[in-house]
Amino acid sequence: MRKFILLLGAASVALAPTAGSAQAGRPLDPREVAEAQQQHAALVAEFGGAETGARAAYVESVGRRVAAFSGVANPGQAFRFTTLNSAVENAFAVPGGYVYITRQLMALMDNEAELAFALGHEAGHIAANHSRSRQQVTQRNTILGVLGAVLGAAVGSGFGDLLSRGAQQAAQLRTLSFSRDQEYQADRLATRYMVNAGYDPAGGPGVLAALGRATALQARVQGRSNRQTPEWASTHPLSENRTQQARADAQATGRLGTGFRNRDQFLAQLEGIYVDDDPAQGVIEGRAFTHPDLRIQFAVPPGYLMQNSTRAVSIRGSAGQAQFSGGRYSGSLENYIYRVIQELTGGRQQLAVPPPQRTVINGVPAAVVSTRANTSSGVVDVSVVAYQWDANTVYHFVMLTQGGAGVGPFIPMIESLRRISAAEAAAIRPRVIDVVTVQNGDSVRSLASRMAYRDFQLERFLSLNGIAANQPLVPGQKVKLIVFGARR
C-alpha cells in the first residue's frame, strides 16, 4: 500500500513577509535550528536514508531558488533541502529551516515548476512559523501514535512507547495538516515565491491535481470509496478544493503560462528513481510483506492495510491494529515477550501477563501471549507473538484487538509468517521511473502494458502522466513509465 498525503502539516496563522532580497526578513530561532540539526540524522534514517548525488543537488538548487523569496534572513544558509528514500508521497518542514521531500512524491510530478511549488509550500510553512505547532500533533496522526494514545488511557502515558517510538518520527511524513487556513496560506506563499523566482505558477495546481489523481486511484486499487470528509468537517482542505484555489491564485498572478517549467531537466532527474518500496526495506505487494534480505514473508488478512518504515510494518483493519518488528536478541522467547510488553507500558505499570504458550509456525519456534487492559474506550486485548528466527534473532507481532478477541482476527497473519527461498528473494526487484519518448504507433494502451504492475496498468499510466484515455500521443513526446529495475 502507498501512504498518501496532501502536502504537509502546519500550525500558526501569522504570514511572513515576502522579501525581494535574499538577506531581508527575520532570522530563524537558533534553538529550533539546533534542534533540527540534532534530529536530522535520526529522521533521515527512519525513512530509509537520503538521496545523494545529482538528484539531491538538483532538488537543493530548486529549493534554494524559491526560498530566496521567503522573507527568511540569509535563506541560502537558513534552509536545508533533503530528498528522502521513502515510499510516502509527501513533503514536510520542521522548525529550524529543514525541508524534506520524498522520492515518491517527486515521481508524481511532471516538471520543475511543480517541484518548486512543493518546496515553496514547505518554505512558506517555515517562514510563517507554521511548523512549530506541528510537533504538538505529530503523535496523534499516525496509526502507531493512535495505538499508544488508546492504550495510554489504560496504564499511563508510557504505554505505547514501543509502538510509537518510530511513529514519533514517522508521523512527520505521515501527518496530514490540521489547519485548512494554514495550508491555503502556504499554497499562496509558494505561488508568490515561485513567480518571483521565474517559474510558471501552473506548477501549483499541477502537483495538487497529480496528488488528487493518485489518491483516487489508490482508493480504487484498494477497493475503497474515494468519498472524502466535507471540508467544513475536516481540518485539511479537500484536494480538489486546493487545486481549484491554487489555479485561481496562479491566474491572479497574471503570469500563468509565462514562466519556465523545465520539464526535460526535471524528467532527466527522475530517470531511474525508485517508486514504491525499496527492497532493502522490504516490499508490500497486495496483502503480502516480503523482505528479500531478511528472507521473511507474511500476509495480512483481507481488508487490512500495511504501512512500511525502516524499523517496522504497521497493520490496521476493522477488527484490530498491529505492528511487526524485531531484530537481534539473545535469550528466551518468554523473556523477549515480557520485555516487549514492559516497553509497551514504559515500565510504569505492570499488566497481568500469563505464561506465553509455545508453538511452531511453519517450522519456526514461536510463543504467544495475550493480556488485557482497561481503557476509557473499553477493554482492549494486547497480544504478542514472537518467532525465534535464529539463535540471535527474534521477530514479533504486537496486536491490539477488542476485549475478548485476543489474537483471533490476526490468526491468518500469525500463521502466514515463513522463510522465503533464495530464488524468491532474488525475484524481488524495485520499481523505477523510465522516461520514454513516444514512437510512431505507440498508444496509451501499448505503453501502459509495460507498467510493472499486475493490475490497473492503464489507470496507473494515465494517472502518472496526467493524460486522458482518449488523448492521442504525439511522436517525440516524453512520458513516464514504471518498470522493474535493478537493485542498488
Image (cartoon, rainbow, N blue to C red):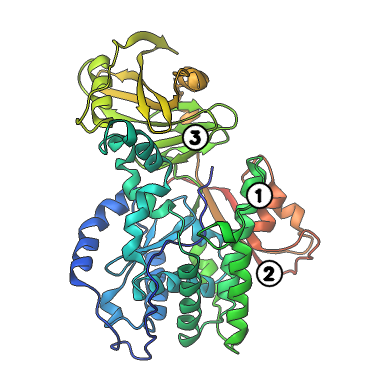
Camera-side residue of 42 and 321? 321
Q: CA distance from mark 3 to mark 1?
A: 18 Å
What secondary structure is marked by label 2? Answer: loop
Residue under label 3, please give it: 316
Q: Residue 392, which numbered label?
A: none
- Residue 88 vs 438, above or below: the answer is above
Position of residue 3 relative to residue 326, above or below, is: below
Residue type at the position of mark 3? Arg
Q: Secondary structure at mark 1?
A: loop
CA–CA distance in space, label 2 to label 3 = 42 Å
Residue that mark 1 sits on: 226
Q: Are marks 2 and 1 in contact (CB under 8 Å)?
A: no
Count residues near mark 1 (Cα–Cα under 10 Å), then give few for <14, some for 14-19, many for 20+: few
Mark 2 vs mark 3: give the one in front: 3
Quarter of the image holding residue 278? top left
Name the residue rendered at 45%, 71% in the picture.
Answer: 121
Q: Residue at x 39, y 84 (%)?
A: 69
Residue 174 in view, yes or no? yes
Q: Is residue 99 left or right of residue 283?
A: left
The residue to which callout 2 is attached is 477
- At horizontal 47% and vertical 34% (from top left) the residue drawn is 315
